[in-house]
């Protein structure tokens, strides 16, 4: 895994996803829109 370009805000996204077990609920928890959450998940996959 490469850490140089890692956005630490994505750890907040991952934590919310693991806690809420759903994209929409996780987005609500961290006050993101669903499209923004989807984009963050896509960045996590890269």
Image: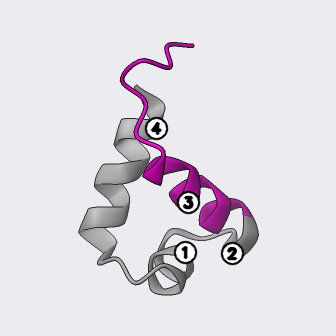
Of the two numbered discs 4 and 2 on the same chain, state the one appearing first in sequence: 2
Of the two numbered discs 3 and 1 on the same chain, state the one appearing first in sequence: 3
When asked about the image quadrant of residue 1, the answer is top right
CB within 8 Å, label 2 to label 1: yes
CB within 8 Å, label 4 to label 2: no
18 on left or right of 34: right
Mark 4–mark 1 Cα distance, whole angstroms, equals 15 Å
Say if 46 sits above or below 15 in the image.
above
Mark 3–mark 1 Cα distance, whole angstroms, equals 10 Å
At numbered mark 3, what does the secondary structure look like: helix, strand or loop?
A: helix
Which mark identifies residue 12? 3
Mark 2–mark 1 Cα distance, whole angstroms, equals 5 Å
For image coordinates 56% across by 60% down, the residue present is 12
Q: Is residue 2 magenta?
A: yes
Q: Nearer the viewer, mark 3 or mark 1?
A: 3
Residue to which mark 4 is pinned: 44
At numbered mark 2, what does the secondary structure look like: helix, strand or loop?
A: helix
Of the two numbered discs 3 and 2 on the same chain, state the one appearing first in sequence: 3
Per the rendered image, the range of residues in magenta is 1-18
């Amino acid at each position: 895994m490469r850490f140089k370009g890692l956005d630490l805000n994505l750890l907040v996204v991952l934590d919310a996803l693991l806690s809420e077990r759903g994209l929409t609920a996780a987005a609500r928890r961290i006050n993101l829109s669903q499209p923004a959450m989807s984009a963050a998940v896509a960045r996590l996959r890269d």
